[in-house]
Each structure stands twice: as structure tokens, then as C-alpha cells.
Image (cartoon, helix red, strand yellow):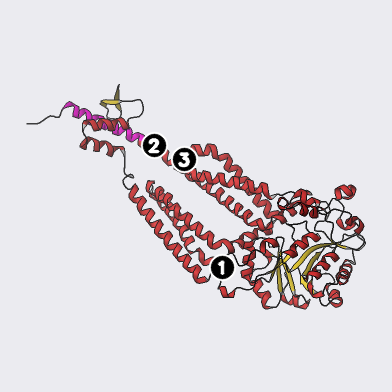
């Protein structure tokens, strides 16, 4: 005897079939829209990543360029004629843009529409301004990009560990994205990109070189420090007070910039005009744009060379000065070369200066070298304490004053240096590699690099074996009694291997955990939900499941008719 099922059972099965068809259609439409959304997410993530990477390089560049902020401001002054700290707005804008883009990177899990609405304009502005900044620096201050590669020798081992930690932590997001992805091709692409980056970081220490990865017994004596313009962060540049402040910091030498006055007196002045470092605008307003060499020594002696320092506070140090120190600073005058040489002779310090040739209409256009040489000999400083950098008439100078240390400010071949009798070389710090330093040391050529103002750069040059450096911050470098870091090759190799092993173990554990966590969700679809409910669940459970699947506003749906074309007639019951 056939036992017929109750009407409620058929009704339930029909209703479940309808729900499965309806929700399945909506599920497929959701999957198609989700695929489109994923494409937009990938494109948006790529744009964010590119912007973030560019800003990261830009931010790192300006962070490491701190050694040359003074040079940058002086460069801007020569172009605009007005002194200002141009690094402040650049750093503020870079920090704000970097923080904003980093926030958007972290917020990638939010809705794409929301992120695009609030972030598109900001990202576009950040990308364009950073690109313009990079191009401008490349065109106007291109040699400064070398600071990035030089700084990597000091920060490379630590940046590697930080980058590896960040990519290792990124494994959580990558593994989760792969576990949720429906397309195998997308999974493979994401996995290959991630593994390529990870493996690159695992083996990149093979290309990292640093002078500070060396045996401690091979470390040479600390480089001697020469005060460039004295101690210009503590007192007005190229003044007697500045040189005295440098000597108080136990510098081994003094360096200055020299110009010839209208009546043939060599004096110290870095700029072409007197506007920045004197009160020429008030004393000689009609001549404030004239070349500094077109003033006679009487006029130069009447100018104040210290008030500008108190007013502009170029290194943010005035606030730490006492009342007496401010009075001393405010009463400085233009210093002559002879005054500086006598001070160096008294302190038994070396003296080095760069000489600017007078303009074409100057009365001493042709005898500028003789005037400077006479000043050196008249000052009474021992010849061996003077580094002579003027290349013009060098042979004549060698014959008249054979004791002067002939110094080149150009990177010349060794044969040329020996032929000219040059025993010292004065170069910018980015112009001499570690190989050049070794070559100069092996051939008894003393190398001096300028301007070295940061402890990390001083430490790096110390490990490289540089004999001496010229600095605008001798008070800072004198506090560096040992390189900031120094490790043997075996120690670095051990750190490298341990870091890679720990990273690999963490990444592997994250992928296994994410696969286990997401394994049951990848095949989770409405058909399975409804069939499972029909077979295993009670009537009450099925009703609850239906209520969860039906969209808002519908409390219960009863199937009236299921047509052959797959459409359904529904009745809403309240």
C-alpha cells in the first residue's frame, strides 16, 4: 500500500525549489557583479601601490638628504634672491601625502565606491605633485640623488629586515585573498607575484654591500674634521666667532670661501652678493645687488655680518643662545683671509679655502692669485698648514711657496695628480667611491670629502677609510666616538639566514591556517543550503532558513505555480 506524503511536505519541497531557483539567479548575478568589482579593486590597488611606492622613495630621499639641507636652501637663494628654509614645506607636504596614501592602503578592505569617492582626487594630487617634485630635483639638483644609493650602504641591512617583516605580515592578506578567490588563474597570479617578492627579499642580501660590514680589527682611525665656514650652525658663517666655535670643538682645520675686494684684499664671502649675510640693504641700499668683490675693504668693514643670523635663524639654534652669546653674534663683521689664517696659525690648525675669481670689470681680474698668495705668506702661517686649491698658475705657486699642500678640487687621474705635484684631493662626498678611497690611500693621496654633517654619513666614511671630512656641523660629528654600527661578515650572514628561516616558517603557517579557515566557505552556495535544510532540518528550521534567505520586506513565500520556463508564481503572506 502506497503511503502518500502530506500536502505540507509537497508544499515545502516546492517552496524550497522556488527559493533555490530565485536565490541561485541572484547569486549568479552577484558573482558577475563581484567579478567586475574585483577588477576595479585590482586596478585601484595597483594605482595605490604605485603612488605609495613613489611617495616612499620621495620621502626616503628627503629624509636622507638632511645632510644637505643647507646646500639646498643656498641653492634656492641663488635662484630666487631670497633666503628661506625650503625644506619645511616639502617635508610637511611629503609627510601628509605619505600618511594619506598609507591610510588608503590600509582601508582597501572598504567599499571600492567609497574609496574611489574620497580617495581619487587625493591620490591624483599626490601622484602628480610627487612626480613634478622628482622631475624638478632631477633637473636642478640631480647629483643629490646619489645620497639614496650612499645611504643604502648604511641602512640597507636594516631596511632589508624591515621589508621582509612587512612582506611576511602581508602573507595574511594574500592567503585570505587566494582562499576567497573563485578563479584559479587569479590565485596563481597572486601567488606568483607574492612568492617572487618574497624570494627576492630572501636573496637580496647577496647584493647588499657596506663598508661597515668588516672585521673590527680593520677599522682605521676616525676621519679628521675640518670646520667648513667654521661652525655655521652655532655662529654666522665665515666670521671669527664661527671659526672660534669650531676650534672649541677640536677641529683639525678651518675652511672658507674667499673673494677679492675692489682694493685687492682677500675676504671671506660665500655668496656673489652681500644681501644674505650682511646689512648692505640698509647701509648701501643702491649697491645691494652689486657683486661683493666690487666693494673696497673700508666699506666691507663697516657692514654687520651677524644680525642676519639672529633674524633668519637658519639652523634653529638662536633660541638656545644666552644673552651674551646673542650680543657676540650680533656684532660680527666681515672677516678677511689674513685674519682667518692668523687664527689657524695660532691654533696650529690647517687652513683650506676656495677662491672665486673676480668678474671681468674688476681691477684685480688678472693678479688675483698673486694677491692671495701674498696674503698667505704675510699671515705667518706655516706653509705646510695651508691646502692650496687654486688650479690657476699652480706651477708658479709651487715655485714661490713649495711648502703649500697642493690640493685638487677635481677628480683627476693619479698620473695627472703626481705630475702636478698634488698631494691632497678635496671632493664632494658623492664623488668618491670606496674603491677610490682605497686607491688614493694606496698612492699616498690624502682625501677630504665635504660636506659631511650627519653621523650616519660620517660613520660610513669612517668605515671606508676616509682620512678627513669637511663639515658644517663639527659639534655633531665630535660626539661620534665609534661608527653607529659595525658587524663582521659572519655576524651579518647569521642574521640574514635566521631572518629568512623565521619569515619562511611564519608565511607557511599563515597559508596553512588560512586554507583551513576558508576551506568550508569556497563551496558554500544557496542550493546546498536549501537541500540540506529540506533533508535534515525540521519544519521550524526550514522556515527560519527561508526567512534568512528571502530579501527584506518578505516574511514568507508560498509557491503557487512552477512554470516550465523556470519562472515562478509567488504569493506573499504577511
Query: Disc 3 versus disc 1: distance between alpha carbons?
Result: 45 Å
Tell whether label 2 touches label 3 (CB within 8 Å). Answer: no
Q: Of callouts 2 and 1, which one flags the residue occurring earlier in the amino acid sequence?
A: 2
Q: Which mark is residue 30?
A: 2
Q: How many marks?
A: 3
Q: Of callouts 3 and 2, which one flags the residue occurring earlier in the amino acid sequence?
A: 2
For marks 2 and 1, give the one nearer the viewer: 1
Taking the spot 57% from the left edge, 65% from the top edge, the residue there is 485
Q: Of callouts 3 and 1, which one flags the residue occurring earlier in the amino acid sequence?
A: 3
Q: Looking at this view, is 284 or 52 the one in front?
A: 284
Q: Residue furthest left?
A: 1
Q: Main secondary structure of the magenta part?
A: helix
Taking the spot 63% from the left edge, 69% from the top edge, the residue there is 462
Seen in the image, is 521 located left or right of residue 94?
Answer: left
Is label 3 in a helix, a strand or a loop?
loop
Range drawn in magenta: 5-26
Q: Looking at this view, is 232 or 172 the one in front?
A: 232
Q: Is residue 334 magenta?
A: no
Q: Would you place residue 123 above or below residue 574 in this image?
A: below
**Residue 402 position by quadrant:** bottom right
In the rendered image, which residue does mark 3 sit on?
110
Q: Would you place residue 110 above or below residue 234 in this image?
A: above
Seen in the image, is 194 located left or right of residue 81?
Answer: left
For marks 3 and 2, give the one nearer the viewer: 3
Q: Looking at this view, is 314 or 355 the one in front?
A: 314
**Residue 480 position by quadrant:** bottom right
Spot occupied by residue 11 in the image (x, y as percentages of width and height): 22, 27
In the rendered image, which residue does mark 1 sit on?
486
Q: Would you place residue 268 above or below residue 98 in this image?
A: below
Amino acid at each position: 500500500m502506497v503511503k502518500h506524503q502530506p500536502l505540507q511536505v509537497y508544499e515545502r519541497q516546492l517552496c524550497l525549489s522556488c527559493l533555490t531557483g530565485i536565490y541561485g539567479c541572484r547569486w549568479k548575478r552577484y558573482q558577475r557583479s563581484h567579478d567586475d568589482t574585483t577588477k576595479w579593486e585590482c586596478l585601484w590597488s595597483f594605482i595605490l601601490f604605485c603612488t605609495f611606492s613613489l611617495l616612499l622613495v620621495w620621502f626616503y630621499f628627503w629624509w636622507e638628504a638632511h645632510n644637505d639641507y643647507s646646500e639646498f636652501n643656498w641653492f634656492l637663494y641663488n635662484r630666487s634672491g631670497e633666503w628661506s628654509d625650503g625644506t619645511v614645506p616639502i617635508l610637511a607636504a611629503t609627510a601628509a601625502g605619505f600618511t594619506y596614501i598609507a591610510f588608503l592602503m590600509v582601508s582597501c578592505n572598504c567599499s571600492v565606491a567609497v574609496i574611489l569617492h574620497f580617495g581619487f582626487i587625493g591620490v591624483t594630487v599626490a601622484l602628480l605633485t610627487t612626480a613634478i617634485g622628482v622631475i624638478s630635483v632631477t633637473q636642478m639638483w640631480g647629483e643629490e640623488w646619489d645620497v639614496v644609493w650612499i645611504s643604502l650602504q648604511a641602512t640597507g641591512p636594516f631596511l632589508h629586515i624591515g621589508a621582509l617583516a612587512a612582506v611576511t605580515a602581508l602573507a595574511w592578506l594574500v592567503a585570505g585573498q587566494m582562499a576567497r578567490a573563485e578563479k584559479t588563474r587569479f590565485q596563481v597570479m597572486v601567488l606568483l607575484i607574492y612568492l617572487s617578492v618574497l624570494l627576492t627579499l630572501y636573496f637580496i642580501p647577496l647584493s647588499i654591500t657596506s663598508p661597515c660590514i668588516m672585521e673590527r680589527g680593520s677599522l682605521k682611525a676616525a676621519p679628521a674634521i675640518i670646520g667648513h665656514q667654521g661652525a655655521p650652525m652655532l655662529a654666522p658663517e665665515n666670521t671669527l666667532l664661527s671659526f672660534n666655535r669650531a676650534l672649541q670643538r677640536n677641529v683639525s682645520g678651518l675652511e672658507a670661501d674667499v673673494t677679492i675686494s675692489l682694493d685687492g684684499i682677500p675676504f671671506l664671502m660665500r655668496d656673489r652678493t652681500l644681501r644674505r649675510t650682511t646689512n648692505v640693504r640698509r647701509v648701501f641700499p643702491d649697491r645691494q645687488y652689486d657683486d661683493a668683490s666690487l666693494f673696497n675693504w673700508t666699506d666691507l668693514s663697516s657692514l654687520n655680518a651677524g644680525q642676519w643670523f639672529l633674524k633668519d635663524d637658519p639652523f634653529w639654534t638662536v633660541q638656545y643662545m644666552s644673552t651674551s652669546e646673542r650680543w657676540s653674534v650680533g656684532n660680527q663683521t666681515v672677516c678677511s683671509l689674513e685674519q682667518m689664517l692668523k687664527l689657524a696659525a695660532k691654533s696650529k690648525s690647517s687652513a683650506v679655502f676656495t677662491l672665486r675669481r673676480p668678474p671681468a670689470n674688476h681691477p684685480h681680474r688678472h693678479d688675483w692669485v698673486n694677491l692671495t698668495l701674498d696674503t698667505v705668506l704675510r699671515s705667518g702661517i706655516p706653509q705646510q698648514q695651508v691646502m692650496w686649491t687654486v688650479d690657476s698658475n699652480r706651477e708658479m705657486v709651487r715655485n714661490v711657496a713649495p711648502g703649500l699642500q697642493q690640493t685638487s678640487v677635481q677628480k683627476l687621474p693619479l698620473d695627472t695628480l703626481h705630475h702636478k705635484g698634488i698631494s691632497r684631493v678635496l671632493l664632494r662626498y658623492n664623488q668618491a667611491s670606496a674603491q677610490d678611497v682605497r686607491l688614493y690611500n694606496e698612492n699616498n693621496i690624502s682625501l677630504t670629502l665635504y660636506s659631511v654633517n650627519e653621523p650616519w654619513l660620517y660613520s660610513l666614511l669612517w668605515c671606508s677609510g676616509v682620512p678627513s671630512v669637511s663639515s658644517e656641523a663639527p659639534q655633531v660629528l665630535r660626539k661620534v666616538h665609534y661608527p653607529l654600527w659595525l658587524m663582521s661578515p659572519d655576524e651579518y650572514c647569521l642574521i640574514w639566514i635566521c631572518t629568512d628561516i623565521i619569515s619562511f616558517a611564519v608565511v607557511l603557517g599563515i597559508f596553512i591556517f588560512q586554507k583551513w579557515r576558508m576551506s568550508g566557505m569556497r563551496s558554500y552556495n544557496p542550493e546546498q543550503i536549501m537541500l540540506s535544510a529540506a533533508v535534515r532540518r525540521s519544519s521550524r528550521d526550514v522556515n527560519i532558513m527561508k526567512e534568512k534567505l528571502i530579501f527584506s520586506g518578505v516574511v514568507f513565500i508560498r509557491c503557487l505555480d512552477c512554470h516550465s520556463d523556470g519562472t515562478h508564481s509567488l504569493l506573499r503572506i504577511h
